[in-house]
Amino acid sequence: WSSTAQFTMSGPPNAPSDLLTEGQTNPTTVTNLAPKFSAIHTDPNEDSAIYYEIHVNTNDSFTGTEMWNSSKTSISSITNGSRSSNITYNGSALSPSYTTYYWRIRFWDTDDNMSDWSSTAQFTTYSNATPYAPSSLQTQGSTDSKKVSTTTPYFSAIFTDPNASDTGEYYEIEVNTEDSFTGTVMWSSGKSSISSITNGSRSSNITYNGSTLQLDGTTYYWRIRFWDNADAVSSWSPTAQFTMLGPPNSPLNLTVDEMKNPMRITSLTPNFSAMHTDPNEDSATHYEIHVNTNQNFNGTVMWNSGKKSMTSTPSGTKSPDIPYNGTPLTGTSDTTYYWRIRFWVSDNEVSEWSPVATFTDYIDDKQYIQMEGVLLKGVKINPPANLPPSAPTNLNPHSVSAFWITFSAQFNDPDIDDTGVYYQIEVNTNETFTGTVMWDSGKTSIAPIANGTQSSNIEYDGSSLSKNVTYYWRIKFWDNKGLYSPWSVSTCVVPSGQGQ
């Protein structure tokens, strides 16, 4: 016999072997969520491989969720017996947290013969994603902390992380006087350790350890962030706030018979009222009023009401009318009185005294008869002829900005010696004054305006205005005889960001 020869039948490549993920066999901590795959190609005919197909699945029988099916895809030619170039994952997003996936591969050779599937390989992902921003912030165990009664409150928040097994290990808290955190820094804890927080759970309580807080009604703003056990840090939480327990604010917008600092009153028992506000949103339940002949309240005491109950007044609203109940007013002389008020709230906290307001007693009998034409001692005295003022003219807003507006107008009266002593201004979103009322000053005293001259500036005292929005305003005056003008024509004002 001759020596032995051999021949090989044409056939497909062998099943790929030695499968690697990220250069490893069945790795358990793949941090790259677009991992790279490779395998060795062998062919009985020593042909090169030029195509591949990869399947990645959540089940080792490939009957679970199909994460990637590459289909038949070209690849750089793989010499027989060599490892393929790296094939980058290009399927559905992989979970970053300890999830195991299964994969297999097959090759086509240059004759387009297809191998069997490789044996199944696997890999487990673990990518340390950053924790989510903390949520559900609580101060003193509440998300609505308006009456914090301790100067060392405690804070907590919920820790959550894309990696299910991660825990929260560190925190940082900032407490500030401004919600932009550009005000006074009350506390910046820095990175501080905390008892491990299970994913999705609330942290243990973190006690305030900053500058001294006071029980004064001040509102503070705070935020928090967490670090996980792999030292990845979250973004800052949304801003939370808390308000210290404190007294009501000093009353504002004091009126006598619905007028601010009236220069003449028409009652010997005028009604007093003021605006109550409270940082803790408590209602006012008691008041105290002082009326005196001296602005320092060291003159004649006309009335000291003492602490008296009143109809409960919610924060941000005006008190009920409180009738004068002191030493009788004479009503016979031009006398100015000074008054102030303070409120108590339901938890017995008392406000500071209000700013000092005034009213003038100016209703002697003769003047009263001339103004009103009433019967006195059985004799009827008709009022003298007097004409009401004309409509104000020369309307003029000053320093028009979103933060500061003043108004003035010319007082006109057919009775040449009359002066303007009261005004009323209305500001509205509609030129017919049927829209939103931004300000209605009511009848308010003003420094006397000589006939035919411009009034002093009147400061806007209504609801907050928006920049670049058109508002409409009008004004009327009362003369010193008690008659009032028609409304002026309306004119518009458009607040800007700067004065003009």
Image (spheres, rainbow, N blue to C red):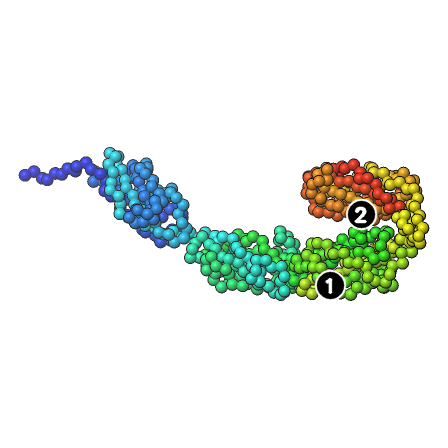
Residue drawn where x is 51% and y is 63% of the image: 204
Q: Residue furthest top?
A: 111
Counting residues from the N terminus, which is met first, the one under dot 1 or under dot 2? 1
Residue drawn where x is 26% and y is 37% of the image: 109
Pointer 2 residue: 443
User: Tag 2, which secondary structure?
Assistant: loop
Pointer 1 residue: 309
Residue drawn where x is 73% and y is 63% of the image: 309
Residue 303 coordinates in the image, percent (x, y)? 83, 63
Q: Looking at the picture, tell me which residue is in the foreground, 52 or 319.
A: 319
Q: Is residue 51 above or below residue 65?
A: above
- What's the amino acid at mark 1? Ser
Residue 244 coordinates in the image, percent (x, y)? 64, 61
- What's the amino acid at mark 2? Lys
Image quadrant holding the C terminus, namely top right
Image quadrant holding the N terminus, namely top left
Judge from the rendering whether residue 44 lies leftward or rightward of residue 310; answer left or right. left
Residue 127 coordinates in the image, percent (x, y)? 42, 51
Can residue 1 be seen here? The reply is yes
Q: Looking at the picture, tell me which residue is in the foreground, 390 or 154.
A: 390
